[in-house]
Amino acid sequence: MGPDDPDRPVKLAHAALHRAGEPLAFGGGVLLAPGTVLTCAHVVNQVLDRPDFAQERPGALDLLAVSFPATGRRRLRAALAAWLPARRADGSPAAEGDVEWSGDLALLRLLDDPGPAALPVGTGPCHAGRPAYAWFGSGAPSSIAAVLVQGVTERWIVLDSTGSAQPVVGGYSGSPLWDRAQRRVVGLVVSRSGLRAFAVPAADLRELFEEAGEAVPGPLGVEDGAHGPMDPVARQLLGPLRSVLTTPEALADLAGRFLAELEAEPEPGPEPATGPGDDRAGVDVGANDARADDAAAIDAGAIDAGADGSGADAGFPASAERLVRLATARPHGAPTLLALLAGAARTQEQQSWIATTALRVCPEQFLTAAEHRELLTLLADGTVPDPRRCAAEALPLGPDLEQAHWPEAVAELERYRPRYGRFPQLLRTVEFAAAAAGPGTARGLGAWSEAVAKRLGLAEILLEHRAQARESAERARERGPQRGAPAPVVQVQLWRATGTEHFSYALHAADARGRPLHRSVRDTPVPRSRLLAELGALLEEVTGQVEPGAVPVVEWFVTGEELDLAVDQWVYRPDELFPGVLGQDFLCVMRSPELRRAAFRPEHRYRWQVLRSGRLALVDRQDPVVQQRGAPVPVCGVALCCPAEEVPRLRAIALAVGVPGVLWLRPADHAIPPDRVRELVHGAAPYQLPRLVYEARLTESPDGLHRNLALVWDSPDGHPETLGLGDPRD
């Protein structure tokens, strides 16, 4: 390993983990700070002869030894500094057979001095489309494996090794993932599957340990700059900034345009000092407000060019650091900087890197300053609807907006990220607002969305959301402007006393914005008439707050055995001329969370999230497509067009695997042909099921269809706090 070896930094930091007295390495590790080695928790478990996914924090590591193959074969003792075992998405321990997990990290504190030759290595951001390299745990130079970064999931970097003679195999776990162009470690190899491998992003390491409550001893990686540790966003911005802006003139030009777009007048900084030895052009970094000094230095053109004027290492990195610190300190600063940087990019690879960074490092503010100002100006037009209505229509499982004003709504929606997919939900809401706005404003909002989506590389995905918004607006025009107004929700938890018509129950009510209105519990079973009297009084109170055209929702939480209970036919208000029938005055749906399988909870959330683009399946027998996980166009609703004796089994399957809406015919005194359900839902989309069933109950049908329609409509959330669904007397 010569001084010109491009992999020298990572080789000096590469650690191997051994079992005491045995020559072979079980896996790798990396020296990220003096005396601190990062590795995988499952590698530590293997060395200690424990199951790979053992969760308990190990005690003494007497069986474990660490070596640095590039600097010698001496074995070093270590103690555990931080422990983050592998866990599933729901927080439960990972197990054999799992293909993805989170965590699986361990920090080791060296008890012996590794010597001056073993040097910590810096970390950097990972970006798609670039090659990276990993070594076997032993660190043997010939074991190098070349991989291609395909992308970053919610937890891992996805790697392919199809072009490498040496794929990543068992024993590479804990190896640092090395970006040769950056000369930085961008991840830690954690798992493999065939020719595909996975790594934990280096940018996430500190956050992962801190979220688990683990104290991290010292920095994870080499810190940049003279102003102290940089936050993760600033660190990830540095990579593309340094790649694109290779001269001090280019950096100074972008810095000036950046400040102009922010419309920020920086506070006056100290008088520049030009004495010898100051490699930061005299910027007084000892001032109390370092960020104000950064802005002043950039605005004054104090971009360091180094002693020879070439922008070499002494000056240019510090100036780039000041710029990214300022970007993270100002509202919409990071996306503004990245948008300007994209305009200066020279290659497609740089463009891809910048786009990936824009989606990854700006979770709370992805709009540039100019985009944000333009959007608020467009939304101030009087033809744009209330943001609460637009968000309720656009986001089936979105945030409950408290504010009726667009500036506050934009701030909240910009922070909101869906669990699945990467399309910003603010853009989706703007599309729904544009579809309902006046023609001039609609064109302006559409052009705005197109520009933002193009910058983020989401132009094609935007078309689908735009089509859905226009379809929604067209339906709203057909049914009248107030028909889709948000409505309050009343939840009834019901427990039947065995063999009787007496019930225990809990009542919950919330207004159209989700704010609680009522909560009561009756533990002692009472006759159904008593339940209906109390429910009727609550419904009378709730309906007084309903907007014109909206229909309050009544959700019935029942056990699986009670799903055929005809609650929608119960009369809650006796009257000779106008009796109050629940299913005709209110939108009644059933919910039974106990029938949902825990393993399919992510699938249930996914189907609910894509409700408007999902499909309705007409089922007359068990159909594998209903159980398919992660389908691009998933089944979000099931209409059971089967004989009555098949309904319980097919209904249970659909609910278990996470289908939000299931429609069926309850047993009737006279048989109703199953094809009647097929006729009812012909051409309907899943999200239309509740309204379709409500309207069918309003229409008398000779065969009794209107009295026997039952619907489960079940979101992943919105369960009452005391949802026990058992007998309260137990």
Image (cartoon, grey):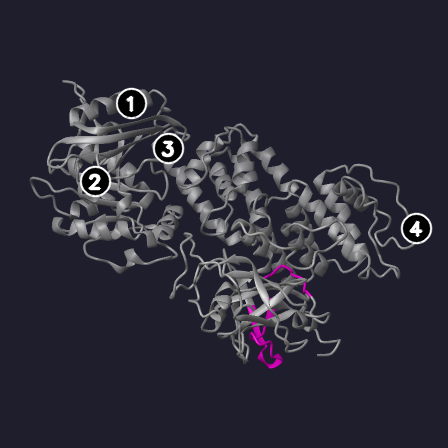
Kindly identify the amino acid type of the residue bearing the numbered disc 2: Ala
x then y, percent, for residue 377: 60, 33
Kindly identify the amino acid type of the residue bearing the numbered disc 1: Leu
Q: Is residue 617 visible?
A: no
Gap between marks 4 and 1 measured at Cα: 78 Å
Numbered label attached to residue 710 = 2
Q: Give 673 or 422, whichever is nearer the viewer.
A: 422
Please name which of the two marks, 2 or 1, marks the residue nearer to the observer.
1
x then y, percent, for residue 407: 57, 32
Kindly identify the amino acid type of the residue bearing the numbered disc 4: Gly
- State the SS at label 3: loop
Q: Give 658 or 684, whichever is nearer the viewer.
A: 658
Please name which of the two marks, 3 or 1, marks the residue nearer to the observer.
1
Gap between marks 3 and 2 measured at Cα: 22 Å
Gap between marks 2 and 1 measured at Cα: 23 Å
Kindly identify the amino acid type of the residue bearing the numbered disc 3: Gly
x then y, percent, for residue 319: 78, 52
Predominant secondary structure in magenta?
loop
